[in-house]
Image (cartoon, helix red, strand yellow):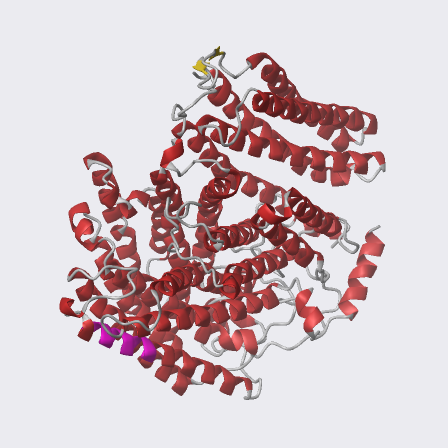
Amino acid sequence: MATTALDQQHAHAAAHGEKTGLWSWITTVDHKRIGILYGATAFFFFLLGGVEALIIRTQLARADNNFIDPDTYNQLFTMHGTTMIFLAIMPLSSAFFNYLIPLMIGARDVAFPRLNAFSYWVFLLGGLLLNASFLFGAAPDTGWYGYANLTSRQFSPGPNVDFWNMGLQVLGVASLAAAVNFFVTIINLRAPGMTLMRMPVFAWMTLITQVLLLLAFPVIAVALILLMFDRFWGTHFFVPAGGGDPLLWQHFFWIFGHPEVYILILPAFGIVSEVLPVFSRKPLFGYAAMVFSGIFIAFLGFGVWSHHMFATGMGPIPDTFFSLATMLIAIPTGVKIFNWLGTMWFGSLQFKTPMYFAVGFIAMFIIGGLSGVMHAPPPADLQQNDTYFIVAHFHYVMFGGSIFALVAGAYYWWPKMFGRMLDEGLGKVHFWLMLIGFNLTFFPMHFVGLNGMPRRTYTYPKELNLEALNQVETVGSFILGLSFLVFLINIYKTTRKPKNAPADPWNGATLEWAIPSPPQEWNFDQVPTVHGRDPLWELKRQRGGPLPEPPHTSGAGIHLPNPSYWPLVSAFGVASIFVAIMMSPKWGPWGIVAAVALLFFGIYNWLFEKGYSEFRTPSHGGH
Amino acid sequence: MSDHAHALETSTGLDSRKLAIWTFIGSECMFFATLISNYLVNKGKSLVGPFAHEAWTDPTTGNVMEPIIEIPLVTVGTALLLFSSLFVVLALYGAQKGNRKMLLVWLGATLLCGIFFVGMQVYEFTHFAHKGLTLQRNMFGASFFVLTGFHGTHVTIGVIWLATMFVLAVRRKLPPERSLNLEMAALYWHFVDVVWIVIFPVVYLIR
């Protein structure tokens, strides 16, 4: 048996080499390709969400405007929020998890390569299902938080809420499958010598993010299921007339929703913690404090959900508790900010494009963090709740935080992913346009918010004197849009350049810079042994200079997982279950039965697929 | 270096599949915690009967009706589910030792217990429906059917999983070196069992 297994490995190894074509992407189980698929899809959705935002800003450019009607406005702000959270920032982070985690921890792939492909396909189908609502003119229109009882059949009779509910449930399956996979990968597939406390901080933040996903997503899954029962099968969980309680939705939603905020920001913390040391030419300041503050933030993240609900009148004791817990989060966050500053302090700073975005991240995130603490006390929150002040706050943490860091990561790892360096000049134009556009858009929102402009309202009367600042915001938002046009031009220009990026263009510290750019399919010819936190810097110090360019090898004898299309079939099974539930008033229960059968068909073929005699753990040994 | 040596070379020494099942179970804990919270929050909020533990007056006939929950049958189901956890441990022991007879007998016993439990639940649900308790009727019906229904779905998936293992064992495709395949199913089965240990008192015993 051992010989046949080895023969199969060699047979497959002989077939190594660049495989291209659509089918190779559809059946890929390579974490790097899946990372690129995640990144491309998420960037497309990001642009879509951006266009939605620009339409919103056009409507708000003038008082009493009627560029779009209120219904369309509701659909646009709901889809903008839902898209940016679930279809842009989360999967952009996933793109980096996928591409980098195995490289950073010295593994050949993730623990379950086919499950990884499954996660991507389910994510793609969920995103398409959510956006298919536009084709029917029935996009979700109740806000990304979908408060009961706005979402009940009585008040939302159309399919809008169903698209939102089913889309999010599909996306939840994708997130949970990926979370199991990456949790196990980081715990179990680290290279010899890479103890937990030697892992790059990005790997740490990824690990913490997976724990948050694992514990928070089941809560929203149940909430969405209960809403589904209310809307399709006549229960009254969130309907007061039947004895239910709409407030319960808010509790469930925010028990998920607040950890979700950290799911969006912790990967960004990780990226910045990789970029800053490399361009400061100094190890990260306070590594252990960085790790533990990340864990502490995640822990507190489960104890602050009701600060989203001060306006519901919970009473003085819950208000006090959640207010104090919220303020407590400023401590570990402050620890991180001081550590980033400490990393730069007395470093020999090299202002390349990734560094611009990383430093921009620190500045913008501080503003967002401070305005966050400003509405931790309930009396202040009651003034700011549902105004543009809140919109300003969360855009400073989500855009000024997450997006700045993700763009920093894109510029930083682009040469590793594609073998080509993005243009530095255009990168800096991108940065300055983005910084100026971002601040012009969102800084005035603090003031219009405090002056009383409510969120989620399609227009405002001229007498409120809010028009001038709104016009500034609209101009800013188009500059922000322009900055991403520059990014697209940069990407286009880069694809026409020769593929000649060195393996280690930035003098990096982590393992991914030791292998060719882009890496070969099997990542490492020989799995490295790690002796410290910045393994590459240590190696270079020992050699007294840069490492030689790693050679391209044949990869003979290295066992790689076979491509498979069963993850895609199973993903169709998952998505079709939720489509069938949505259509059950028309199709009856048989649609659901057929969809479940399709899922089982996919899973059984997956489990008993030839060439996968057993569920495998990617081997560490190599030859 | 042989292929088997590779498989053991994980950072923790644990097989990744086993770690994955534990991770998944951790996530499932939050799923059932939310469902059980939902049941407890909605306890006593029913506007009309049938109630779980109190007598109720039928508004159409004016008759006073008994509380709907009947403990004896569910107790038998609970006992069998608990025993099935022991049986699956014995089956796994048989699989690990290469004792095929032991594996088949105890895995078969586990399956019978699981099938009885699902059957018990189907009977209970239809019985309740006849007595007027439906999803739509009141908050107890809604939260009861959703909570126990999702648990029942998990038991059903566990039965399908264990049945697949049974078929593999019959076809001699579950040798000791692959007993981990059964161990994963068994871990999931224990979890489904433990969840019922919480649901049974919360729904049936505590008034």
From where the camera sits, is residue A147 visible? yes
Quadrant of the frame with the C terminus of chain A = bottom right
Residue located at (64% from left, 26% from top): B122
Question: Where residue A378 sits in the image (x, y, percent)?
Answer: 19, 46
Whether residue A236 is in magenta: the answer is no
From where the camera sits, is residue A280 visible? no
Above or below, B167 relative to A489: above
Rendering quarter of residue B92: top right
Q: Is residue B174 left or right of residue A514?
A: right
Instruction: Looking at the picture, tell me which residue is in the foreground, A301 or A555.
Output: A301
Residue located at (40% from left, 32% from top): A242
Question: Where residue A231 sits in the image (x, y, percent)?
Answer: 48, 43
Question: Where residue A3 sits in the image (x, y, percent)?
Answer: 84, 55
Q: Is residue B167 left or right of residue A36?
A: right
Give the mark count. 0
Rendering quarter of residue A426: bottom left
Question: Where residue A584 sits in the image (x, y, percent)?
Answer: 60, 46
Please, which residue is most extreme toward the front here? B61
Instruction: Looking at the picture, tell me which residue is in the foreground, A38 or A270.
Output: A38
Q: Which residues are magenta?
A: A469-479
Whether residue A476 is in magenta: the answer is yes
Instruction: Looking at the picture, tell me which residue is in the foreground, A403 or A461.
Output: A461
Secondary structure, magenta segment, majority class = helix
